[in-house]
Amino acid sequence: MADGIRDKVAILGMGCTKFGERWDVGPGELMVESFTECLQDAQIEKKDIEAAWFGTCIEEVGVGKSAIPLSLTLRLPKIPVSRVENYCATGTEAFRGAVYAVASGACDIALALGAEELKDTGYGGLPDLGAGSGPTNWLWFPNVTAPGGFAMLGQAYAHKHGVDAKDLKRALAHISAKSHANGAKNPKAHLRKAVTVEQIMGAPIIAHPLGLFDCCGVSDGSAAAIVTTPEIAKKIKGADAQLVSVKALQLACSSGEEMGYSKWDGSYFMTTRVASKKAYAEAGITDPRKELSMMEVHDCFSVTELVTMEDLWISKEGEAWKDCIDGVYNIDGEVPCQVDGGLKCFGHPIGASGIRMIYEMYLQLLGRAGERQLKDPQLGLTHNLGGFPFMNVCSISIVGRYDG
Amino acid sequence: MVGITSYGGYIPKLRVDRMMMFQAAAWFAPAVIAVAQGERSLCNWDEDALSMAVEAARDCLAGMDKSALDALYLCSTTLPYADRQNSGIVKTALNLKDAVVTADMTASQKAGTTGLITALDAVAGGQKKNIMVVASDKRESKAMYFYEMWFGDGAAALCVGSENVIAEFKGSHSVSHDFADHYRGAGYKFDYMWEERWAKDEGYTKIIPEAVKGLFAKLGITMDDVDKFAFPCFFTREHKGIAKALGAEGAKLVDNMHNVCGETGVAHPFVMLISALEKAKPGDRILVCGFGQGCDALYFQVTDEITKLAPRKGVAGRLADKRKMPNYQKYLKFRELMEVEMGIRAEAGGQSAVSALWRNRKMITGLVGNQCRKCGTPQWPPMDICVNPDCGDMGKKDDYEFSGKSAKILTWTADMLAVSWEPPCTYGLIDFDGGGRMIVDFTDCEQKDLAVGKEVRMTFRHRWFDKDRGYHGYSWKAVPVKEEKKEGAK
């Protein structure tokens, strides 16, 4: 039986651009920006990279199809480059491709780079692809947007657990207030302004019960990672260098059960519950609430983060809303979450987001997180949720200090 | 015996108070106060003549075996397609068998009664056993004028056959005249109307009596042999005057329904006939006329079978189920008489693949899912491999109609980001009684009407219009069932 990815691959270097409305640059310049930082950090040369994985999701308003936008922009010397797309798990998918390539022994050093330019649409929110969503879907699928799709979690969660609408709204506001406080400390974050729970609760409704501050930023940005084996990493960085290794990489995709079979109650993510259990097993974690030092989860909307706390088996079912109000996930809480501001404030250029989350874990584990540095973190979890609660893909990665 | 075997009605829920319309228009057209009584019916933004026709037809099929239908005639002057058979879309939405005659009858306000005579003749001739005739109209009119007051939107359906006849067909008489009190050239949105005095004096007042007297002579009857006389005429004084001149006064004359919905175009003779049938006793004799470039007059006698008719909404049920249009500006937007900034997001669109629609016609137009033969799970969308995780059977599946099933809301939202004619856009997940789950748009409701566990029923709606290509798309939505209906039944 396979023994998993744990400690087979180390992160040699990482880079991340400032996220935001990058009117000043296009996707190519964003890729160069994250790659330059990543390459310097890795202490290698471009020619040392043997294969690359490129993650971008909405190519229609970004770079177009194929991996060529990456190989061409970085002038990669005719190495294998693959383009991956898996909704909001796209960035983590690129990372998974590079990590698996190294783990398999197919290559020694691989690059994962995610980039997304979302703001060339002329309107707020994610692009609406119309008939580009598929000819049959276009003929029948309801008029669902991202905030509306996730807002439905709120009604179902409140109904299932008997949470008063006001209490739910307050818990959601605590989630966003915490991320705003963290984002304000991060120079690379898209939104850097602290807001109060009252401001959040009073904001205009986007999709009931979610208001403006319950929704993450739609941003331009890029993030990159270079991975290799721990042995090679030691050779390059020195025997005493602290390394960050991959402890787990898991992915779960919906079978259509949530949307088509009358069993799921609409209040949680079936995929996350499966992927997280597998990830903990792969990483050797038995008590995630105690063992995880920090998390970056997919807070596309505050309510997504709320239910994810239960789906990751950190909060007890039906109690995450109380934990959020009680500050369990604040930067000084029991399990700090969205330390870099999260999707909420760091921003969400889809193809880059998964790698940006790993970037924060990497900085924290190496003690390079500046003003928001946590004390002695050992293990960090990142989580992406692409699609809708009723039909989605969940990716989870766990990274930590390499003690080999 | 040949005659009507079933009826169904559809009046859209939205009603516009005519005094509210007058108040908005008075500065420009003070004379419209003359007709500013009661309320008119109005299509929701996602309804048109075709979607209303489907709803009326569904009502008409209550308690009927739809596989017995040999033909479907759709009568209207406001159908969405000039060349793509509209009745074929209705047939697919109703999930009728393929071996059926479908025909569109159009270009005159009497197209409905003409379709009905044609159907009755076909059944009498023995070539067909059961035919459904659906009439529907969503007539457009420019703002701030009499016609937007007179017109209403609606549809009605009648089945004709020779078994279980509720109203026996006794005979008809038709006259044809190229009398153009109004006309609408091909490709034009609005009617062009000639002076109303001429339409009344030379048209209604002469042509309707000509047809009625012709029928009386043919059948050897007089107005004494008529218990209810139904004919459309939105000039209320002339409506009464023509009837009186023909000998029909008081309760004998069926109300022109100006106060409750307005004139529903081609559907109106059927709507009025059904409103008479809903109150009729066995033995009642009904005379109904359709007017438009001539006149059709038909004579029926109600039978005992009417007492056995399965429950349905009919015209009365639809009239009672209403939602108020709050202001004139919203009316103007819904009628596309006012250009509203919908934002760049609303530009998202693209071609509609008719090849994909053909492949999935039962699913998309007919709301037909499928059912696992092994575990019995009904599934939407229909797929080859069973969705039940404990089953997963890969064998053949059977068609499963969801359109008539009631469902309950699992979860929902009201979305201000989604492009909508009536924000917030509401949608959610519903669970059907008997199994099956669907992600759907809600319609004919507001946010306050939605709650987890609330009952909904499915309705056929106009989905979107692709202005670049002239394509009209249709799909099904869910409507919350009103609470008061249940309370009333207690």
Image: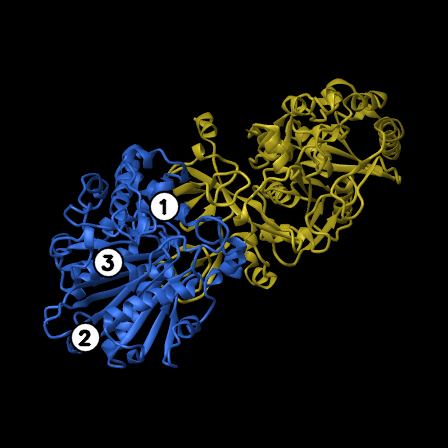
Residue at left offset 63%, top offset 23%: B20
Image location of residue A144, percent across then percent down: 45, 49
Question: The disc numbered 2 marks a residue on which chain?
Answer: A
Residue A90 falls in image quadrant: bottom left
Please identify which colour was used for chain B in the image.
yellow
Q: Nearer the viewer, residue A203 or A163?
A: A203
**For residue A108, side relative to residue B5 (left or right):** left
Q: Residue at x 88, y 40 (%)?
A: B178
Disc 1 packing (10 Å; few <14; some 14–19; many ≥20): many
Q: Indicate the chain on which mark 1 is placed.
A: A
Question: In terms of sequence position, does the residue under pointer 1 or pointer 3 come before the other?
Answer: 1
Please indicate whether residue B273 sits to the left or right of residue A138 in the image.
right
Query: Which numbered tag is attached to residue A215?
Result: 1
Chain appearing in blue on the rendered image: A
Q: Earlier in the sequence, mark 3 or mark 2?
A: 2
Q: Which residue is mark 3?
A: A360
Labels 3, 2: one chain: yes
Q: CA distance from mark 3 to mark 2?
A: 32 Å
The amino acid type of the residue labelled 2 equals Met
The quadrant where residue B190 appears:
top right
Tell me if residue B329 can be seen: yes
Q: Say which element carries label 3.
A: helix
Q: Disc number at residue A1?
A: 2
Mark 2 is surrounded, within 10 Å at the Cα level, by few (under 14), some (14 to 19) or many (20 or more) other residues, namely: few
Q: Residue at x 44, y 33 (%)?
A: B449
